[in-house]
Amino acid sequence: MTDALIIGGGPAGLMAADVLSAAGHSVVVADAMPTLGRKFLMAGKSGLNLTKAEPLPVFMQAYGAAEADLSPMISEFGPEDVRAWAEALGQTVFTGSTARVFPTVMKASPLLRAWLARLSEQGVTLQTRWRWTGWDGDDATFDTPTGVTRITPQVTVLALGGASWSRLGSNGQWAGLLLDAVAPFQPVNMGFDVAWSDHMASHFGAAVKGCKLTAGESISRGEFVVSSKGLEGGGIYTVSAAMRDGAPLVIDLLPDMPVEEISTKLAAVKGKQSASNKLRKALKLDPVKRALLNEFGRDSDLSLPEKIKGLAIPQLTPRPIDEAISTAGGVRFDALTDDLMLKSRDGVYCVGEMLDWAAPTGGYLINGCLATGRWAGLAAACRLQLSLGD
């Protein structure tokens, strides 16, 4: 009999395996994909933002409605702890200008290799191409390359991911096995479709910087990108949940310049000038900002300075959930104990993105996965130790 079974080989599952194996327990990690940590590696393509160097009270605010539920876990494994964990695996880190923390090498593969090597040294068995199909009594059942396989663990940690990036292993299909405990999935940190007019084609791929984006109570000063599909990027992702829920997006193209100053500068441009030239000469608006102003402001009754300060974007359609960086929905916290164990199934814990929480990009997602994996791993190790005492 295996002490601990971890289903899912992303950062949350691997952290649970790390904690349990370090405590001396036999651990099997099973993952449906050919290799482990595929979404983790994909995140590393943009530098692997591990966490954010913020005071914990500020950091926790990013988790919104789940702040109270996640606070105990992240308080025990917050930004400084993530830095120390990465460096213990031989990966130095640095803090960028926006307080985001990255490995010095700016990729995930060296960190993942070092982590898997440590797990191997601690005796963890890694099984790939094992697709979990549910339970048969106390047995966890899997479809594997050699046929149906059963494992009877003393504790199980489910780390099955959310419902986006299915090609990397997160497809949310596991929800059918935990129906009574699951809230519906919704996309988070996603782009939005825009039916662009033809003149926007020359701006596809352009980054829009130095704006303030507002949707409901969500505010972002991050940059975003005009793509052939629509609007995407970190600035949009920060306000995407509010946009998804119907809040209109408003863009302030010059957030550090009051409307009166804009009016004065525009009025100071002499002679016959096109609107585009006036914006370029008086306000130094770059081409993509001028294009957005024309695209979304041409039918507005507001004055030009008012449009610059509050460019209203019509309600947009989110890109498909599978393209979202992360998802809300999943296993509800009220279906779990404080240790993240399912109330409906003794000894089975849930961690990572399969839990019903959401956060913007910026290091909050990986930190949350690591913290919940560690929390459940410690609880499962304690449970095993108590059973040995019996």
Image: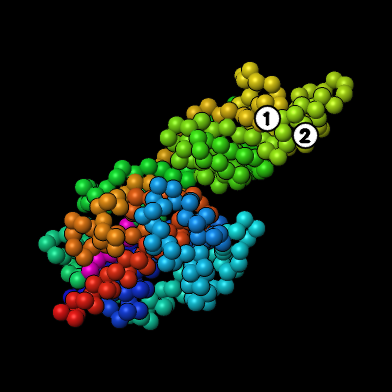
Name the colouring of the figure.
rainbow
Q: Which one is in front, 12 or 121? A: 12
The reply to whether callout 1 and callout 2 are in contact (CB within 8 Å) is: yes
Three-letter residue code for mark 1 = Ile
The boundaries of the magenta stretch are 155-160
Q: Secondary structure at mark 1?
A: helix
Q: Which one is in front, 170 or 79? A: 79
Q: Percent position (x, y) of residue 15?
A: 38, 68
Q: Residues within 10 Å of mark 2 (few under 14, many from 20)?
A: some
Kindly tell me whether residue 127 is visible in this rendering: no
Kindly tell me whether residue 62 is visible in this rendering: yes
Q: Which residue is mark 2?
A: 283
Residue 86 part of the magenta-drawn span: no
Three-letter residue code for mark 2 = Leu
Q: Which residue is mark 1?
A: 308
Q: Percent position (x, y) of residue 350?
A: 29, 59
Q: Quadrant of residue 150?
A: bottom left
